Amino acid sequence: MAGELTSELIAKAAKIASSTLHEAAGRIGALPAAIKPVAPGMTVCGPAFPVKGPPLDNLALHFGIDEAKPGDVIIADVGSHYEGGYFGEVMCTSAKALGLGGLVIDGCVRDGAELAEMGWPVFSRGLAMRGTLKDLNGDLYINEQIALGEAIVEPGDLVVGDTDGVVVIPKSMAADVIKAGIAREASEAATMKRLKDGSTTLVKMRRWERK
């Protein structure tokens, strides 16, 4: 189906830096810069499964783990309340066993050492020990559109994260952006070769001459 992410597209996207995809897409899709991997070297790539819940409540995350498909990346909005540990070792054990692709949360997690050792991709604003609740009457959004910072995240959008942060590319644009990203990386490789040979990063231009 047009606009859907295929395994081939996801495999290609996984080899491209998040910042490159952001630039190739026209500088869109960057999630808040505070969201980073909880351990060095973690990367994430896959279709978005957005969830949103009330502050200090992680029930939406539990539903997300239960309903997402293997390979899906859960993208979580916690209502702008960051001082809570919304996800930890127990939930990670479940998500990893179910084959989910990773978690990107605009909030904090806990059990940092254990998450790092498990190696399952977790991107968050940081670590916080404060516990959270599960309100069955809370305002929950499961696999629906959410907004994180300036980015709008739709179910099935392409999510790519690495040391630089996380970018979300609309699924309708993914194929073209990946193609442009590959071309951009090839161009940058050629530029770096010239720089190693002694060129500079300044572009030489003719002076504008007065008539």
Image: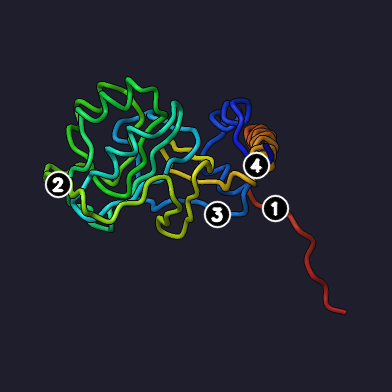
Specify the color scheme.
rainbow
Q: Which residue is mark 4?
A: 3
- Compared to residue 11, the image places residue 169 above or below, namely below
x 26%, y 28%: residue: 92
When the figure is inspected, residue 27 is found, relative to residue 195, above or below; the finding is: below
Residue on which the image places disc 1: 203
Residue holding disc 2: 133
| 2 vs 1, front mark | 2
Calculate the distance from the C-alpha at mark 4 to the C-alpha at mark 1.
38 Å
Which element type, helix, strand or loop, lies under badge 3?
Answer: loop
- Local secondary structure at mark 1: loop
Disc with the residue nearer the chain's start (4 vs 2): 4
Residue drawn at (42%, 54%) of the image: 146
Q: Look at label 2 and name its amino acid.
A: Leu
The disc labelled 1 sits on which kind of residue?
Val
Determine contact: label 4, label 2, CB under 8 Å.
Answer: no
Between marks 2 and 3 in the image, the one whose residue lies nearer the viewer: 2
Q: Are marks 3 and 1 in contact (CB under 8 Å)?
A: no
Q: Are marks 2 and 1 in contact (CB under 8 Å)?
A: no
Between discs 2 and 3, the one toward the N terminus = 3
- Answer whether labels 4 and 1 touch (C-beta < 8 Å): no
Total marks in image: 4
Q: Is residue 76 left or right of residue 14?
A: left
Quadrant hosting residue 40: top left
